[in-house]
Image: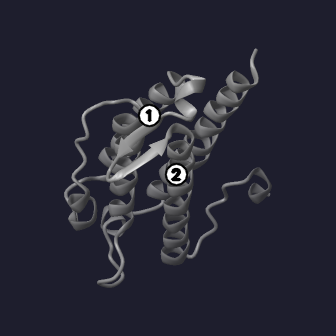
Amino acid sequence: MKIEDQILKSLQLEFKRRINEEGLHRIAKCLSMLTEQEVWLRPNVNTVSIGNLVMHLSGNVRQWICAGLGGQKDIRTRDLEFSTESGINKEELMERIAQTISAANKVVDEMTAADLNKKFDVQVYKENGLSIIVHVVEHFSYHVGQITYAVKSLKNIDTQYYPEDLG
């Protein structure tokens, strides 16, 4: 196997580990700890709710991976990700993000080594495939950290993400 193909395979596996096994798992755990009201709580006018962050992650992943890398139609309505204040329950939020991640996994799995350096249009940017993957993993992790912090602050609990946390 050529080195480019080995790098691509490693990147695809790492994408899934960081997004699916860490990020998606943590979002599900956090949402399970909250009431519907807490999901949409905005502590002040300068912050968004956990529900907004989940919607934002779904929109971002769909735009950057599915539309950008995958060439699908860009259906993102970014303003709604931040202006929505209720009306979507925890299960619907989880289903949306899970479906988005599933679609993104398929796009990433279908990448070729040449796609890592190929330029793609995303928002107002021209980014190569590697940059898109790095952006999405970093962005996802950043907001999952915000969600985790919000849940820990709101509930005064340890999310127990790691096996050593369980005793």
**The disc label shown at residue 104, or none:** 1
Out of 114 and 153, give the one closest to the viewer.
114
Dot 1: what SS?
helix
Residue 164: x %, y % from top left? 80, 55
Query: For the residue marked with disc 2, what is the amino acid?
Result: His
Rendering colour mode: one colour
Indicate left or right for 10 with 43 as reference.
Answer: right
Out of 91 and 103, give the one closest to the viewer.
103
Q: On the rendered image, what quadrant is the N terminus found in? A: top right
Res. 55 in view? yes
Q: Residue at x 51, y 30 (%)?
A: 108
Q: Residue at x 40, y 44 (%)?
A: 64
Res. 97 in view? no
Indicate left or right for 86 with 143 as reference.
Answer: left
Out of 15 and 45, give the one closest to the viewer.
15
Residue 65: x %, y % from top left? 42, 38
31 w.r.t. 113: above or below: below
Residue 94: x %, y % from top left? 38, 45
Dot 2: what SS?
helix
Q: How many marks?
A: 2
**Residue to which mark 2 is pinned:** 135
Q: On the rendered image, what quadrant is the C terminus found in? A: bottom right
Out of 10 and 105, give the one closest to the viewer.
10
Cα–Cα gap, marks 1 and 2: 13 Å
Quadrant of residue 54 in the image? bottom left
**Which-is-in-front pick, marks 1 and 2?**
2
Indicate left or right for 69 with 139 as reference.
Answer: left
Q: Which residue is drawn at 33% across and 37% down?
A: 67
Which sits earlier in the primary sequence, circle 1 or circle 2? 1
Query: For the residue marked with disc 1, what is the amino acid?
Result: Ala
Q: Which residue lies furthest to the top in this view?
A: 1
